[in-house]
């Protein structure tokens, strides 16, 4: 087994190992990979420091500079997956200065906290899934054979589902008292027979023979408390959702009976069981800790809020957004519905093409909060060739797999790969440079007809040659102006 696969915690990877992991998905950009690898490793090192020193070590935020489609976002996203860290991508242009209508910058922290909460909740539920499935199996048998369970757990968790019924017949939640001592033998025989029948149904259930059987499930809708973000630093965008929650709370709980198959009932019961087994407060505490210590916020298009030249009203607004972002990046406490989040040790990665502005056009205070600057290179034909062939999720592999579902085998000749790479670089140089995203459109245009008629080519092997590429992309080859609209 590869040494990289032995390490479950991505944060414990060495910088070289991190770069090696990133290489499996992203071609080139070694300088940027090296910078983020060191930043991730420093987080791991920081956690090993004594507590009095640990709090003084702040993350070194990164500013990525480069054209679109060269891997800025993908590097940050893959980095977050490596260390299983809460990750959020936002666009700087979506925010407005405090006092204006629109999203305030603190909402990025609230969104990151929501990501962290869902991540931790999913992980905790996965550890309890086996236990939950055992309980769900018993519930399904209660659906199929009401009153057949030998004994009920008196302190079963409350909330979630109401007593479940099958075709309108309620499930007996409590054992019936013995009517007399004389009927004890008869009751025992009935219980044994019912228990035997229950075990037969259990075997059928596990073999999947009852998946299409329909049952009635009565669900109690739980009303969540109104979001506290409205009262704890939230903005007007949350008001409507909060008012709906308040209205729902005063309307009381409502129930809904659903007739579903055993397969669907298993899914519904499992989700409900997992929700009841999880302690929300424990999830919130763990999520908040993870967000504060390992959260990553990727701020894209930060160059769009840079101020250049004379400052008009729009530029003042952009500068206001920068000033609002500044305390978040410096480290401040933000109220969320999961608790107060300290942003001091959240890693911020900003990115922009900086075609019309330069990093020096950002306000000096914000520039100082992104001390690491890396420039990403533009992609050329040789880079496009590697992108088409080498990554684990290479486009050629994706399209071949998609068409294989129709029993069509697609083979890309080397000459075809070279031709597509050249065309991608050529069109980028002659029109808008959109980086590797150009390959998506080229591949889609190239295989459009084959994808449309795939069912008619089942069992065939289609070889994509250079001539095939030129034929399908002839408009690009022959008409430079037209290519601007096609691609």
Image (spheres, helix red, strand yellow):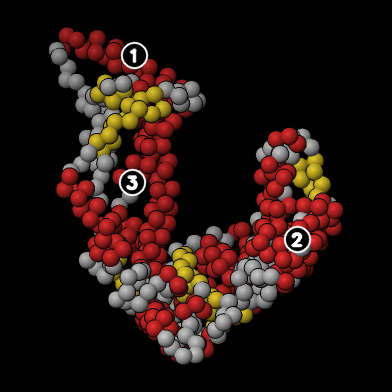
For marks 1 and 2, give the CA distance: 76 Å
In the rendered image, residue 107, in percent from the top left (x then y), is placed at: 36, 68
Residues under numbered marks 2 and 3 in contact, where contact means CB atoms less than 8 Å apart:
no
**In front of the other: label 1 or label 2?**
2
Q: Residue furthest left?
A: 180
Q: Nearer the viewer, residue 167 or 41?
A: 167
Considering only order in the chain, which callout, 2 or 1, is on the residue closer to the N terminus? 1
Q: Indicate left or right for 107 with 441 as reference.
A: left
The residue pinned by badge 1 equals: 193
Considering only order in the chain, which callout, 3 or 1, is on the residue closer to the N terminus? 1
Q: Indicate left or right for 269 with 5 as reference.
A: left
The residue positioned 74% from the left and 39% from the top of the image is 408
The residue pinned by badge 2 equals: 476
In the rendered image, residue 363, in percent from the top left (x then y), is placed at: 44, 88
For marks 1 and 3, give the CA distance: 34 Å
Label at residue 275 = 3
**In front of the other: label 2 or label 3?**
2
The residue positioned 26% from the left and 38% from the top of the image is 220
Q: Nearer the viewer, residue 289 or 131?
A: 289
| Residue 265: quadrant of the picture | top left
């Amino acid at each position: 087994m590869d040494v990289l696969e032995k390490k479950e915690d991505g944060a414990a990877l060495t910088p070289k190992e991190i770069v090696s992991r990133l290489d499996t998905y992203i071609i080139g950009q070694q300088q940027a990979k090296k910078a983020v690898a060191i930043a991730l490793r420093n987080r791991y090192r920081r956690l090993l420091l004594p507590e009095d020193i640990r709090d003084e070590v702040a993350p070194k935020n990164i500013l990525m500079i480069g054209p679109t489609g060269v891997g800025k976002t993908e590097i940050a996203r893959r980095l977050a997956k490596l260390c299983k860290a809460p990750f959020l991508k936002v666009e700087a242009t979506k925010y407005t200065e405090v006092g204006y209508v629109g999203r305030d910058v603190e909402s990025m922290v609230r969104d990151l906290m929501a990501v962290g909460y869902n991540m931790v909740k999913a992980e905790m539920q996965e550890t309890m899934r086996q236990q939950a499935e055992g309980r769900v199996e018993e519930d399904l048998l209660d659906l199929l054979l009401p009153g057949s369970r030998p004994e009920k757990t008196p302190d079963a968790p409350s909330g979630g589902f109401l007593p479940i019924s099958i075709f309108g017949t309620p499930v007996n939640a409590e054992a019936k008292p013995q009517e007399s001592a004389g009927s004890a033998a008869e009751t025992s025989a009935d219980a044994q027979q019912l228990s035997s029948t229950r075990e037969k149904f259990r075997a059928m259930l596990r073999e999947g023979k009852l998946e299409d059987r329909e049952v009635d499930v009565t669900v109690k809708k739980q009303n969540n408390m109104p979001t506290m973000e409205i009262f704890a630093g939230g903005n007007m965008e949350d008001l409507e959702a909060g008012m709906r929650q308040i209205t729902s709370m005063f309307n009381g709980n409502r129930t809904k009976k659903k007739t579903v198959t055993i397969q669907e009932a298993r899914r519904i019961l499992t989700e409900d069981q997992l929700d009841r087994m999880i302690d929300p407060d424990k999830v919130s505490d763990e999520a908040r800790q993870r967000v504060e210590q390992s959260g990553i916020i990727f701020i894209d298009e930060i160059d769009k809020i840079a101020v250049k030249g004379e400052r008009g009203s729009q530029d003042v607004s952009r500068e206001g957004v920068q000033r609002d972002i500044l305390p978040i990046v410096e480290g401040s406490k933000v109220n969320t519905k999961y608790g107060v989040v300290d942003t001091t040790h959240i890693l911020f990665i900003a990115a922009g093409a900086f075609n019309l502005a330069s990093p020096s056009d950002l306000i000096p205070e914000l520039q100082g909060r992104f001390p690491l600057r890396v420039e990403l290179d533009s992609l050329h034909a040789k880079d496009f060739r590697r992108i088409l062939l080498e990554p684990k999720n290479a486009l050629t592999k994706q399209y071949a797999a998609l068409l294989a579902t129709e029993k069509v085998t697609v083979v890309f000749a080397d000459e075809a790969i070279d031709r597509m790479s050249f065309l991608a670089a050529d069109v980028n140089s002659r029109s808008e440079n959109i980086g590797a995203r150009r390959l998506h459109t080229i591949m889609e245009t190239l295989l459009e007809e084959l994808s449309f008629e795939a069912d008619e080519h089942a069992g065939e092997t289609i070889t994509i040659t250079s001539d095939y590429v030129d034929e399908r992309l002839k408009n690009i080859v022959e008409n430079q102006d037209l290519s601007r609209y096609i691609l």
